[in-house]
């Protein structure tokens, strides 16, 4: 069974349909990248998977449980965490306080051990653990947001534009960290505008346009597909 299965989902805002009969899946311990032009429905898909939007039609299954109409907090407790593109840290709290807030649903059990695990994955955060998140660079904030989500040791991590507005050097660093997260056994569903790099990292990918699947395949196959290259990868 896939870890996540989205079956023939139609979803949107009010009467406006953004996703139309969309199906994707994420297997355990793999990275799946969602690419496509602006307005394709990528962020709407993430919100629908995480329960922030409920489908008009179709079904979402996670870890063999129907979560189509589940509330986000219940989805978190089942092992899925979501890092949105913006407003993803508490800017008036320190790095360490952000991590502790991320761990809140599990209480204080093994809190120090879990923080040490995040600091091992993101060494910069250990150095800056007393710094306010609002005073950090965009790349550092993204590490705080990802670290906070990982405090729950999820089975699946949703990342919405994790490298948006970052310098090329920081983009490379974030992608490297995403690969390390997958290596720990956590599956990742990622929406990315850096399409070429995300597909190089991904096990599989989907190309969305107008709320529908246009192409799907392994990351390597999509990179080699001339139609995908011409329309979505800039050549």
Image (spheres, rainbow, N blue to C red):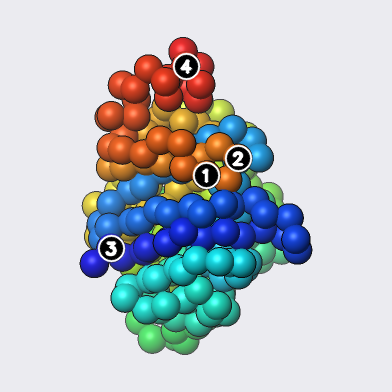
Q: Secondary structure at mark 3?
A: loop
Between disc 2 and disc 3, the foreground one is 2
Tell me whether the residue at label 2 lies in contact with that at label 3, contact meaning CB atoms closer than 8 angstroms. Answer: no
Local crowd size for mark 4, using a 10 Å CA cut-off: few (<14), some (14–19), many (≥20): few
Which tag is nearer the camera, tag 1 or tag 3? 1
Disc with the residue nearer the chain's start (4 vs 1): 1
Nearest to viewer (mark 4 / mark 2): 2
Secondary element under disc 2, as helix, strand or loop, is: loop
Q: On the image, numbered disc 1 is attached to which residue?
A: 212
Residue 2's tag is 3
Mark 4 or mark 1: which is in front? 1
Residue 151 at least partly seen:
no
Residue 71: which quarter of the image? bottom right
As measured in the structure, the alpha-carbon distance from the residue carrying label 1 to the one carrying label 3 is 20 Å
The reply to whether residue 105 is in sight is yes
Residue 220: % across, % down: 27, 29
Residue 93 horizontal side relative to residue 189, left or right: right
Closer to the chain start, of discs 4 and 3, is: 3
Give the camera-side residue of 137 and 218: 218
Kindly identify which residue carries mark 2: 210
Image spot of residue 173 (x, y percent): 42, 37
In the image, taking residue 79 as reference, residue 55 lies left or right, namely right
Residue under pointer 4: 230
Badge number at residue 130: none
Label 3 neighbour load within 10 Å: few <14, some 14-19, many 20+: some
Of the image marks 4 and 2, the number of the one nearer the N terminus: 2
Q: Quadrant of residue 216?
A: top left
Asked whether the residues under the numbered discs 1 and 2 touch, taking CB atoms below 8 Å apart as contact, a structural biologist would say yes
Instruction: Give the position of the N terminus as an image quadrant.
Output: bottom left
Residue 228 locus on image (x, y percent): 43, 24
Label 1 – label 2 distance at C-alpha: 6 Å
């Amino acid at each position: 069974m896939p870890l996540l299965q989205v079956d023939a989902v139609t979803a949107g805002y009010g009467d406006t349909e953004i996703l139309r009969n969309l199906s994707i899946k994420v297997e355990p311990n793999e990275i799946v990248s969602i690419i496509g032009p602006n307005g394709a429905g990528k962020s709407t898909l993430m919100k629908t998977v995480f329960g922030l939007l409920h489908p008009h039609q179709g079904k979402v299954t996670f870890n063999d449980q129907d979560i189509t109409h589940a509330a986000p907090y219940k989805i978190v407790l089942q092992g899925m965490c979501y890092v949105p593109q913006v407003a993803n840290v508490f800017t008036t709290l320190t790095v360490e306080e952000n991590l502790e807030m991320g761990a809140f649903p599990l209480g204080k059990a093994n809190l120090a051990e879990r923080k040490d695990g995040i600091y091992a994955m993101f060494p910069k955060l250990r150095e800056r653990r007393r710094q306010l998140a609002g005073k950090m660079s965009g790349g550092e904030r993204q590490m705080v947001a990802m670290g906070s989500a990982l405090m729950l040791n999820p089975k699946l991590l949703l990342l919405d534009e994790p490298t948006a507005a970052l310098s090329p050097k920081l983009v490379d660093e974030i992608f490297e960290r995403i690969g390390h997260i997958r290596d720990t056994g956590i599956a990742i569903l990622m929406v990315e505008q850096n399409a070429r790099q995300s597909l190089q990292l991904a096990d599989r990918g989907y190309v969305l346009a107008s709320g529908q699947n246009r192409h799907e395949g392994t990351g390597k196959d999509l990179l080699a597909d001339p139609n995908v290259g011409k329309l979505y990868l800039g050549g």
